[in-house]
Image: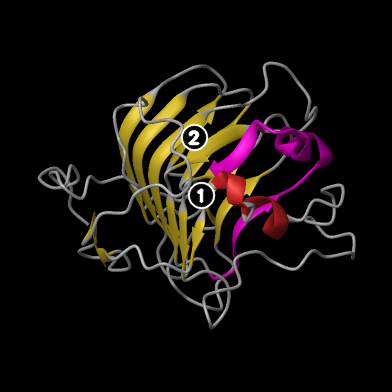
Amino acid sequence: MGLDDGIEFFGGTANVDHLLVTGPNDDGLDWDEGWKGTASFVVVQLHAGSGDNGIEADNLEDDNDASPRSQPTIRNITLIGSNEASSAQRGILFRRGTWGIVENAILMGFGAEAVDVRDEATVMGTQGADPKLAVKHSYFFEIGGADGENWFATEPTDGSDDDDDDGFVESDFFSDASLGNTFGTDPKLTAPYNMKAPDFSPKSTLTPGGAETAGDFNGATYVGAIDPDGDDWTTGWTKF
C-alpha cells in the first residue's frame, strides 16, 4: 500500500522469488535500465481506485535501444486487478525497448486490457520464431469492459501514447497458438479480489497451455504463483 511502485528494479541481474505486493498506488512490479534477472512466484494485487499496471516494464526512456537491454524472465506470477469494469488498470505494459519473457502467469480483473506493447524498439523483441518479448502459457480471465472478454484494447490512430508501436497488434500476437495462452477460463482462485483478507491459492490445478518449455525453472509445472498441491507460502507472515 505504498504511494509508488511495489517493487522496482533499476538495471542489474538480481534474481528474486516469493514476492507479494498488494495495494500499490502505482505499479506492482516495475523494471527499467537494463534489468536481466529472474523473478518467480510473484503475487501482485491492485486495489479498487488505486494502482495502474500489474507490471510496468521499460528499458531506457532516453534511448530505447540502450545496452544492456532490460530482458528478465518472469515465471509463475499472479496478477490481480480490482475487477472494476470502468477502471484503467492494465495487466502488463511493455514499453521503451524492454524485452523479456513472462510465463505461466495468471492475469485477471483488469478493466482496461491485459497487455499493451509500446514503442518500436519494444516491438522488435516480438519478431521471429523465438521472440525475446512474450507472455506464454498463461491464463487471462475477467479483463476489459463489462463482459470481461475484451482482452486487448483497440489500436488507436490518434497520436496517443499507444499509437507508437509500429502497427503492432497485441491481440494477434498474444493470441497466437504458438504461445499457448488460454483466454476466458476461470483460474478459480479462492478470494483474489478481497482487499482485507485475500487468498490467491487456486481451488484447482491449472497447467500451462501448449508446449511447456521451462519446467526446469525452479521446478514449477503449474500456472500462477501458488502451488495448488502445496502450501500457501503467503500465510503466516502477512497481514492485509
Q: Position of residue 225 (x, y in %)?
A: 31, 45
Identify the image quadrant of residue 57: top right
- Magenta region: 111-135
Q: Is residue 123 magenta?
A: yes
Specify the amino acid type for callout 1: Asp
Residue 105's place in the image compared with 18, above or below, is below
Can you name the residue that lies furthest to the left here? 236
Q: Position of residue 175 (x, y in %)?
A: 62, 56
Q: Residues within 10 Å of mark 2 (few under 14, many from 20)?
A: some
Q: Is residue 39 magenta?
A: no
Residue sitting nearer the eye, 178 or 19: 178
Q: Are marks 1 and 2 in contact (CB under 8 Å)?
A: yes
Q: Position of residue 145 (x, y in %)?
A: 58, 78
- Identify the secondary structure beneath mark 2: strand
Residue 32's place in the image compared with 203, above or below, is above
Residue 39's place in the image compared with 5, above or below, is above
Q: Which residue is mark 1?
A: 27
Specify the amino acid type for callout 2: Glu
Q: Residue at x 49, y 47 (%)?
A: 4
Residue sitting nearer the eye, 128 or 161: 128
Question: Which label was assigned to residue 74?
Answer: none
Q: Which residue is mark 2?
A: 8
Residue sitting nearer the eye, 46 or 204: 204
Q: Position of residue 212 (x, y in %)?
A: 43, 37
Q: As drawn, is 119 to the left or to the right of 107?
A: right
Can you name the residue that lies furthest to the bottom here? 146
Residue sitting nearer the eye, 81 or 129: 129
